[in-house]
Image (cartoon, rainbow, N blue to C red):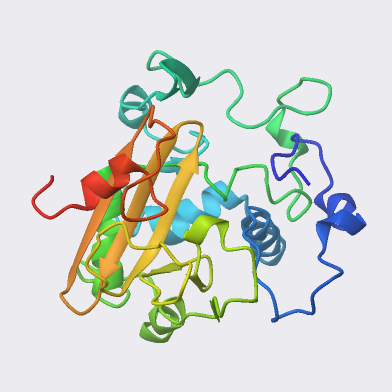
Amino acid sequence: IDYVLPLDADMRAILEKPEAWDARHAPGTWFHYTNFNTPVVAAVAEKITGERFDRLMERLVLRPLKLDACFQFTTCSPDAVKRAVVIYRDGKPTKDDHQGALPACPVTPASDGSCNLSVWRAGRNGATFAPQGGLRISARGLARIGRMLLNRGTLDGTRVLRPRSIALLETPLWTYNGDNRDIDAGFHCTYGLAVEFLATASAGCRDDPFGDGRRRFGHAGEAYGLKSGLWIDRRTGTGIAYFATDVPAAPGTRSAFSLIEEALARPGNP
């Protein structure tokens, strides 16, 4: 199923389709990566609060962390809009080539091509503001989120998450055991609440772009030719945030990550 839904879509109708579910495996026995989990969570958050997802994230996360970031450009400052990075694939723009201006429609248009955000209804379509990958944020902004995670929920004296929430984020909920998923060439081997864990010492797992075997947690981003990541090493109290566009499809030499990601993960690189 497609997680990119038009503005006027009813997400419940999508989730009622049999193909939205795995009928072959009981809950908790199998892992398969999906981008539809975050729109579902966004819909629940909207329904509970009555707020649009983009504005909710601005109020609860982005503003407290002093981040000039936004989902789908709807709440970004003019300066952030001007600084937007164009994403490329094969030398051609694939996303955000707006010449420093706001896009004509910041979300996926309605099925008739219109773009009237007043049709939004809390919880009806959690995919509207692209919670699965629509955050426009700089590498420096990602690093601030990393600092907050390292500080167990606080940054510069402001608490964003409780320590027990951080502990939950750092808890793996699934680990590959050789027979409980298709591991995507070894890319996903240990996973939690939309948090990926590196590195997994199991046959077939190639989830260590750093090549040092150390445990890290975070998330890898991949879309439209973009490769990005935020990885935290709790033991050393360090982390890394990166992004690169127009990344060739060539696989890495020591992991299932790309060559450029392995290079960015190498010690001494900026």
Image x and y of residue 123, in percent: 74, 56
Judge by depth and name the residue closer to the eye, 29 or 108. 29
Mark yes or no: residue 202 visible. Answer: yes
Judge by depth and name the residue closer to the eye, 122 or 106. 106
* Quadrant showing the C terminus: top left
Q: In which quarter of the image is residue 212?
A: bottom left
Please state if 227 lies on the left or on the right of 67 as rendered.
right
Please state if 208 lies on the left or on the right of 175 as rendered.
left
Q: How many labels does the image show?
A: 0
The residue at the point 60 percent across, 43 percent down is 129
On screen, 117 above or below 134? above
Image x and y of residue 259, in percent: 31, 42
The residue at the point 44 percent across, 80 percent down is 165
Please state if 215 lies on the left or on the right of 22 as rendered.
left
Mark yes or no: residue 140 visible. Answer: no
Image x and y of residue 25, in percent: 79, 75
Image x and y of residue 16, in percent: 91, 58
On screen, 270 above or below 19? above
**The residue positioned farthest toward the bottom in the image shown:** 164
The residue at the point 52 percent across, 65 percent down is 194
On screen, 143 above or below 247? below
The residue at the point 62 percent across, 50 percent down is 52
Judge by depth and name the residue closer to the eye, 177 or 226. 177
Q: In which quarter of the image is residue 34?
A: bottom right
Please state if 194 lies on the left or on the right of 160 as rendered.
right
**The residue positioned farthest toward the left in the image shown:** 268
